[in-house]
Image (tube, grey):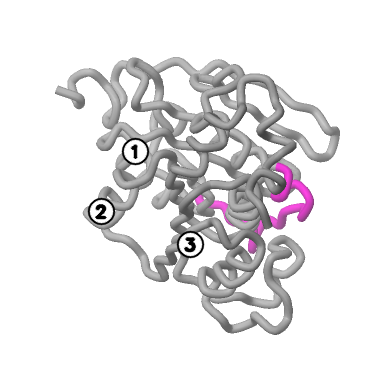
Amino acid sequence: MSGSIRYSRQVTLPGWGKAGQDRLGASSVLIIGMGGLGVPAATYLAAAGAGSLVINDFDTVDASNLARQPIFDDADIGKLKVTAAAERLRRQNPDCRLTTMDRRLDAAQLNDAVAASDVTLDCSDNFPTRFAVNAACVQTATPLVSGAAIRFEAQLAVFRADLAPGPCYRCLYDESGVELEDCQGQGVISPMVGLIGSAMALEAVRIIVGIGKPLHSRVLVYDAATSEWRAIRLPRDPACPICSDSKQK
């Protein structure tokens, strides 16, 4: 399919044009986690014309994933998520270059993967991974789009270590005080993860193309039970062990 037709609705947007589409086509996006958030994020980034997607997940498809991760079906059960997802995404948009990483990344590997991306999306489901991804993004000055969803609650935030000064994910959560909840134990409503994952893709596209008002330094909180959004201003923590001035010297 001709690229001019595929992306025509985007190219005509004010502030986008061919130059914006070219920037998106030349970009590389790293997605950590191909679960309920990573699947819609990857789907819309590939469809929008992101040039390169690097997807990282070491889990396999389980029947319990299918309600929240519609890129997979029954035939994919038991397959590596990144393998099954890459097959679908390549068919969806052959222009998008897909790279899969089916292993848990150590600190050095994570830093290298983050540094090679224009934007990193944290679609993981646990705090240790979120803290590690945040540290890598701060160290490499890479924009981070962070999403989370559990029960009827979700949040979306963007952290721009490339635009100093500003907060990082560690300014939002104290590593020693977080509660280790997960969707398996607490549950989550399926359409909500699609909503947040799609919003994460939108934020990544806006960063790459350079349009709209940045979400940087704000956290959006969504209540799916009432359909209410709240925006919370997030200040930088001067004592943050990751992004404080003393740590950046």
- Residue that sits furthest to the right in the current view: 226
Residue 107: numbered disc: 2
Q: Position of residue 124 (x, y in %)?
A: 51, 53
Q: Nearer the viewer, residue 174 or 158?
A: 158
Judge whether residue 149 is colored magenta. Answer: no
Q: Quadrant of residue 92?
A: bottom right
Say above or below: 62 vs 42: below
Q: Position of residue 32 (x, y in %)?
A: 46, 54
Q: Which residues are magenta?
A: 180-195
What is the three-letter code of the residue carrying label 3?
Leu
Q: Nearer the viewer, residue 153 or 4?
A: 4
Residue 98: numbered disc: 3
Residue sitting at x 46%, y 47%:
29
**What's the distance in space between the residues labelled 3 and 2, CA to CA?**
22 Å
Residue sitting at x 45%, y 29%:
159
Q: Position of residue 220 (x, y in %)?
A: 64, 27
Disc 1 target residue: 137
Which secondary structure, mark 3? strand
